[in-house]
Amino acid sequence: MSELTHIDDQGRAAMVDVSAKPAQRREAVASGRIELLPETVSLIQQSQVTKGDVLATARLAGIMAAKKTAELIPLCHPLALTHVAVDFEWCEEPCALLIRGSARTQGPTGVEMEALTCVSVAALTVYDMCKAVDSSMRITDIRLDSKTKQ
């Protein structure tokens, strides 16, 4: 196993110094799912959820969350994000919404935490907006799908 980078020589949590690293174009893509009842999917697709447009709200929440990742995760570096996107895809078996989030920056460190935060908060927003009509929802499989630097 590799050495932990967020631990200093005295075993304390520490932010990694990335000042000597070159700025590079970096991108990360994450995904997750939220399983819902078919009736809930129908309400979302027909814009009949009483709290409003679920997917539009979840998209905005994911973008906003990516921008605030350094405020939520203690040892993350604040990044100047150049792009954040949230996309949705319906899955029939099991009935679920696939959420994909991507983040880009030009900097010395990666954006995987931003992409993961984006997906997590988008899923939580769907849950919050639909919890009154579907108590069986499950958020699952949040993961990093890819990260690149050029």
Image (cartoon, rainbow, N blue to C red):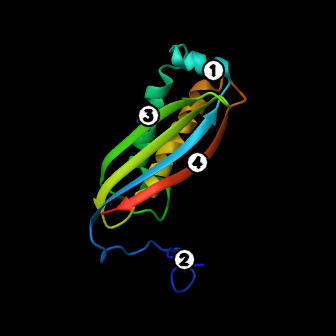
Of callouts 4 and 2, which one flags the residue occurring earlier in the amino acid sequence?
A: 2
Which numbered disc flags the more N-terminal residue, 1 or 4?
1
Q: Which residue is mark 3?
A: 59
At label 3, counting other C-alpha atoms closer than 10 Å, the crowd grade (few under 14, some 14-19, many 20 or more) is: many
Mark toward the start of the polypeptide (3 vs 4): 3
Task: Name which residue lies at 50% across and 50% down.
Answer: 116
Sequence-first tag of 1 and 2: 2
Residues at marks 1 and 4, CA–CA distance in whole angstroms: 21 Å
Residue 104 at x, y = what percent? 34, 52
Q: Position of residue 127 (x, y in %)?
A: 60, 32
Residue 69 appears in the rendering: yes
Q: Earlier in the sequence, mark 3 or mark 2?
A: 2
- Element type at marker 4? strand
- Left or right placement of residue 30 versus residue 137 in this view: left
Residue underneath mark 1: 40
Figure label count:
4
Residue 108, placed above or below residue 1: above
Q: What SS does tag 2 mark?
A: loop
Helix, strand or loop at label 1? It is helix
The structure residue drawn at horizontal position 27% and vertical position 72%, both measured from the top left corner, is: 22
Q: CA distance from mark 4 to mark 2?
A: 23 Å
Residue of label 4: 142
**Which comes before the other along the chain, label 3 or label 1?**
1
The image position of residue 144, as x and y in percent, is: 52, 54
State left or right for residue 82 relative to residue 53.
left
